[in-house]
Amino acid sequence: MKYLSLILPFIIIAVVTYASSKKVKVYDSFVDGAKKGVETVFSILPYLVVVFIMTELFTVSGLSAKFTNLISPVFKILGIPKEITPLVILKPFSGSGSLALLTEIFKTYGVDSYVSRCACAVFGSSETIFYVSAVYFSKSKEKRLTRPILISLASTLFSTVIACFICKFI
């Protein structure tokens, strides 16, 4: 384990040595990269704020609970347990909120239950679609979001159905 902690410092020293041998001004390049990173953070910040606010409003307003009750019967037909419906709905919006729901599922049903296995598979095989879209499309010239988001949501639903099906046999 001691040797693993030396990998990153070794890589940094190797890169700095190589860049210096090529007459690159390492410190100036680092500062330029940091400056561009800060500019990127400030340029995507408004998009992220909107996603965070909309996610919180969706939950606090009660729309999340109503939507969960509305869509649970459809999910049941597809083989998705009703207990993980809130996780399936929240995951495209919020990773940390989904993690909190996953933890609640573990506490309620136990970590070895069918519901928990499905929840783990859903959590691990899906992405925070709206967060990623906000970050990606904030820097992209392409601003038509509808098709990529619908494709991402459809693939997430498909992977959720397959994951729950597989979890029945594990």
Image: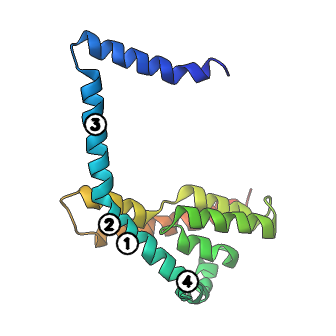
Lateral position of residue 51 relative to residue 23, left or right: right
Q: Earlier in the sequence, mark 3 or mark 1?
A: 3
Three-letter code for the amino acid on which mark 3 is drawn: Gly
Give the Cα separation between the discs numbered 4 and 2: 21 Å
Q: Earlier in the sequence, mark 4 or mark 3?
A: 3
Badge 4 density bin: few <14, some 14–19, many ≥20, Cα 10 Å: few
SS class of the residue under badge 4? helix
Q: Which labelled disc corresponds to residue 33?
A: 3
Q: Is residue 168 visible?
A: no
In this figure, which residue is indicated by the disc labeled 4? 60
Q: Is residue 27 visible?
A: yes
Three-letter code for the amino acid on which mark 1 is drawn: Val
Q: Residue at x 51, y 66 (%)?
A: 94
Lateral position of residue 81 relative to residue 52, left or right: right
SS class of the residue under badge 2? helix
| Total marks placed | 4
In this figure, which residue is indicated by the disc labeled 2? 46
In this figure, which residue is indicated by the disc labeled 1? 50
